[in-house]
């Protein structure tokens, strides 16, 4: 479904990704683990078109997306939940979701216009509302509450739900468990499993390597902008090297 081939991404003169090659097959949950600064977020931002690679190719369902702008990549079926959630604090829960039904590229700007889809109550958007409210009933209860007044866990649920509004084929999740209480983390991980069962392929970035590898079929370990290891989630969990460096065992 997704193939990165020798991707190099820079921040000015700094080379953050030094030749990343990885693939995600349809239906999989694949995780990217690695220490702070390894290049995990940069990898997701390069896939979603927020950053442009200086070299290498990215193909998605047979099309080269390396040069596409972020909104076209969303239209192709890739949705990105960025690190730190970044919901709109002064829009209600419902309005945040409407923005997701519109497009990620508008989401990244500060005050986007009211999305025409949401205004008209088009069938497709409505059913997507029902789906996310079913998954996270608390969002339905808090539909009219401002995004910024939600708890951290609720904001993460909203960020994931907003990304689902565009009905992605591939969901990129950047540290969904960050800063959340263990019980909320299991709720979020359960939701990720459900989303995957509904047919959405998932590329998951996590500091919580144990939980991520348990959830994922396959995993990649990033170190200093390069893929250090990859394999089945359960093999990585049992690897002495991974245990020592990433699982604190
Ligand atoms: N805007 C930026 N300008 C310059 N360098 C950056 C920028 N963003 C990230 N970097 C650098 O690129 C490298 C990779 O960063 P990235 O955010 O992808 O790491 P990460 O694996 O997501 O880390 P974390 O676990 O802390 O989120 C780091 O060395 C970081 O300092
Ligand atoms: Mg990061």
Image (cartoon, rainbow, N blue to C red):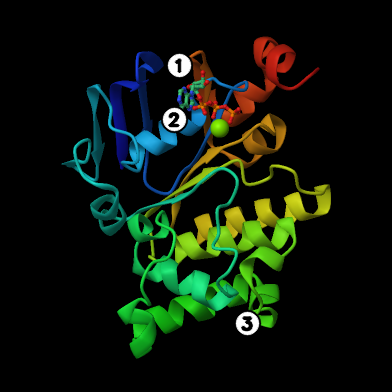
Quarter of image, res 83: top right
Q: Position of residue 39 (x, y in %)?
A: 49, 24
Q: Position of residue 194 (x, y in %)?
A: 58, 60
For disc 3, the neighbor class at 10 Å (few under 14, some 14 to 19, many from 20) is few
165 on left or right of 185? left
Q: Secondary structure at mark 3?
A: loop
Q: Foreground: 108 or 103?
A: 108
59 on left or right of 93? left
Inter-mark Cα distance, 2 to 1 = 9 Å
Q: Position of residue 197 (x, y in %)?
A: 52, 58
Q: Is residue 70 above or below residue 46?
A: below
- Marks 3 and 1, the one that precedes in the sequence: 3
64 on left or right of 150? left
Q: Secondary structure at mark 1?
A: loop
Q: Residue at x 43, y 69 (%)?
A: 99
For disc 2, the neighbor class at 10 Å (few under 14, some 14 to 19, many from 20) is many
Q: Is residue 139 above or below residue 176?
A: below
- Residue designated by label 1: 225
- Residue designated by label 2: 42
- Residue designated by label 3: 144
Q: Is mark 3 within 8 Å of ligand 2?
A: no
Q: Residue at x 22, y 35 (%)?
A: 66
119 on left or right of 34? left
Mark 3 or 1: in front is 3
């Amino acid at each position: 479904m997704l193939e990165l081939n020798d991707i190099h991404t820079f921040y000015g003169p700094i080379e953050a990704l030094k030749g990343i090659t990885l693939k995600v097959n349809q239906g999989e949950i694949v995780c990217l683990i690695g220490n702070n600064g390894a290049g995990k977020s940069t990898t997701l931002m390069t896939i979603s078109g927020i950053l442009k690679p200086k070299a290498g190719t990215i193909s998605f369902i047979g099309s080269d997306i390396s040069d596409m702008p972020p909104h076209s990549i969303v239209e192709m079926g890739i949705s990105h939940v960025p690190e730190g959630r970044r919901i709109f604090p002064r829009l209600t829960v419902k309005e945040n979701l409407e923005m997701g039904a519109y497009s990620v590229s508008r989401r990244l700007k500060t005050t986007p216009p009211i999305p025409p889809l949401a205004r008209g109550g088009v069938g497709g958007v409505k059913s997507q509302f029902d789906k996310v409210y079913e998954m996270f009933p608390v969002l339905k209860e808090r539909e009219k509450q401002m995004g910024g007044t939600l708890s951290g866990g609720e904001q993460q649920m909203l960020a994931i739900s907003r990304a689902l509004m565009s009905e992605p084929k591939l969901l990129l999740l950047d540290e969904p468990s960050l800063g959340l209480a263990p019980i909320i983390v299991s709720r979020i991980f359960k939701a990720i499993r459900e989303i995957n069962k509904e047919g959405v392929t998932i590329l998951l970035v996590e500091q919580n390597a144990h939980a991520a590898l348990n959830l994922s079929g396959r995993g990649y370990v990033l170190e200093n902008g390069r893929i250090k290891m990859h394999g089945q989630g359960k093999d990585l969990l049992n690897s002495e090297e991974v245990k020592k460096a990433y699982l604190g065992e």
